[in-house]
Image (tube, rainbow, N blue to C red):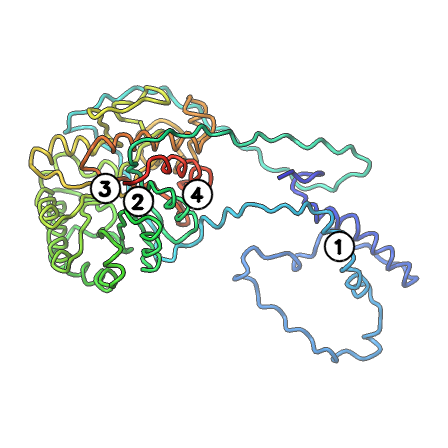
Amino acid sequence: MSPNLGSPGTSSTDKCALHFEPLLTRCYSNFMHTETTPEPSGKDENDRLDPNPESSPSPVPPQQANSAPPDRQRTWSRRRFLAAAAAGLGVLVGACSNGEPSLDAASLSATSSTPGSYKGYLPWVQMRGLRPAAVPVFTPTPPKATLTPFPTDTPVPTNTTVPPTPTYTPTPTVTPFPPGPPSKLGIFITRNHPSVFNVLRSGGVAVVKTLELDFRFARQIKEAAPTTRLIGRIDLPQLQLQNLNARAAAQDFVNRLWPIADHPERRLFYDGWEAYNEPVAGNLDEFKRLTEFEVERTRLLAQGGLRSVIGNFGTGQPSPEMWEHFLPAVAEAQAHDGWLGLHEYSAPTIYYASTRDGQGRYPGVAPHDTGWLTLRYRQLYNQILKPAGRAIPLVMTELGVDGLVTNRPGPQDAKGWQHFQEYWAQHGFGSWGPGAYVEQLVWYDQAMQQDAYVIGGCIFALAASPGWESYEIGGHVESVLHQYLSVHPQR
């Protein structure tokens, strides 16, 4: 879209109003043969569009048509004259505007139809217990560039040379990904949005996790992508483990979930159900209560023919020495065809704190690679679950780049992937952020493809909920991801 000419921050409509309102004022003065006092060029405060209509006061009811005396109704006041000229002015203003549409970024951040808000927990990870990957040493990250604020609007001076229209750098041409084996990438979605089905139609989405529980939405997902696994989670406050009665809490959870999950179409379309999101045990006793809760929840749901997705621990959780105490829950899930859920994030790149960190933009990945944040799941399976005979199917129910991981390099106030684009450009990971991010996700996909027990991993997030906009992958990331998935279809 070409920028508006003139002073920064002044729209073409405003400029037309600046030029034509004095003209109309002079015409009105000549018409009435009286002297008029010029009004300010800006609109009255009450005439501005309220960006939050719900908070605006109720409009004043209009007066009845015959409430004014007949002689007053025929009087040509300045306001009536200007109102009569509004039609002509509207045409002129319309001619001044460029008529080009603008992108509606708000459509990807609307409130989720599911009540509540997503809460994450990404603690500092202590690198101990498991056989560690080497932790590279990083140089301090340069401070982020300071953004220059927009200047204050000023009137357009007369007889001033209009500066040339600046040339914008177009979106770079993306080199298509070549065909390959079926992808294990999936998406985390919070609500129904057209972008969801655009990605699903690629044919390559392995798994979807959703907080949107409308059975019609679930049906549409399966119609668009019949082989995609679908996981649901009801929005509940965090589980309090301090004095938890595990069996009673499990029964309470099932009582809450059952009216939703037992719906005939949800039974048909949902492949598994999570419990609480990213539970955190403060000590061993709390962790044992959590294990008992998951054992009982899995058993109760299995009695009703529903699959459990257990765990759903946050990045770096739990600590290695805790995992042996979770084996009873893994065994119960294994007995009832359940799955294990984990979250894996890293930052400033998805490679950070893995054995491939520090190896550039295209580090490659092999089955022996592990990590402390991403690829941490391999340490769990290789050192604990496989030796115990408990290598149950695994889903990364959230994954991506997340600045909430602490004790890391890069901009410290960054959150989602969008906040790391400048860092990536400065450090050789690609000058175009969306493409650079998909490259990192593809690296993680290649790792998952090497592990038969992995069902897939859900990128956080598409159609993100308010407060998580910097994680949003709708738009350019969606387009590049669609191309990759289309040449790595499910079979």
Tell me the residue that label 2 is attached to. Answer: 120
Which part of the image, by quadrant, shows the C terminus? Answer: top left
**Front tag of 1 and 2:** 1
Three-letter code for the amino acid on which mark 3 is drawn? Val
- The amino acid type of the residue labelled 4 equals Gly
Mark 2 Cα-neighbour bin, 10 Å: few <14, some 14–19, many ≥20: few
Q: CA distance from mark 1 to mark 4?
A: 37 Å
At a point 39% along the width and 32% down the height, the residue shown is 437
Residue 436 x %, y % = 41, 29
| Residue corresponding to mark 1 | 91
Q: Earlier in the sequence, mark 1 or mark 2?
A: 1
Q: Amino acid at mark 1?
A: Val
Q: CA distance from mark 2 to mark 4?
A: 21 Å
- Specify few, some or many for label 3: CA neighbours under 10 Å numbering under 14, 14-19, or 20 or more: many
- Judging by the rendered image, the residue that carries numbered circle 4 is 474
Task: Report which residue position mark 3 lands on.
Answer: 395
Comparing labels 2 and 4, the label whose residue is closer to the camera: 4
Callout 2, which amino acid? Gly
